[in-house]
Amino acid sequence: MNLLADGLVLLLLGQTVVFLFLGLMVLAIRLTAVLIARWAPSQTAPPSPPPVSAPPKEESAEIPAAIAAALHRHRNRFTTPTTP
């Protein structure tokens, strides 16, 4: 019975230490966030979005054909032909 009591004491001690450590870590993170917010330079204006280019008016048929040919070649790269 003495071993069971020692195990329970170790269990409670270990969980208490972990709980206190995690609580201190949360407090340290919050304190760091407050300090950074106080001393960090404030942004005057949000950055402007990158310029948007106009989409092409008409897509030629060569581009989809080239993509289809590349996919076909890639998919059939490691297969052997079934007809001689």
Image: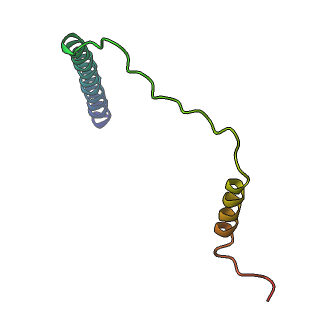
Number of disc labels: 0
Give residue 2's quadrant in the image: top left
Is 66 in front, or is 82? 66
Considering depth in this image, is 36 or 72 the residue closer to the camera?
72
Residue 34 x %, y %: 24, 12
State left or right for residue 4 relative to residue 50: left
Residue projecting furthest to the right: 83
Q: Position of residue 53 (x, y in %)?
A: 54, 33
Looking at the image, residue 7 lies above or below residue 49: below
Depth check, front residue: 65 or 73: 65
Task: State the quadrant of the N terminus.
Answer: top left
Compare residues 54 and 38 and report the one nearer the observer: 54
Residue 55, placed above or below residue 31: below
The image quadrant of residue 40 is top left
Picture quadrant where residue 5 is located: top left
- Residue 15 position, x and y percent, is 30, 27
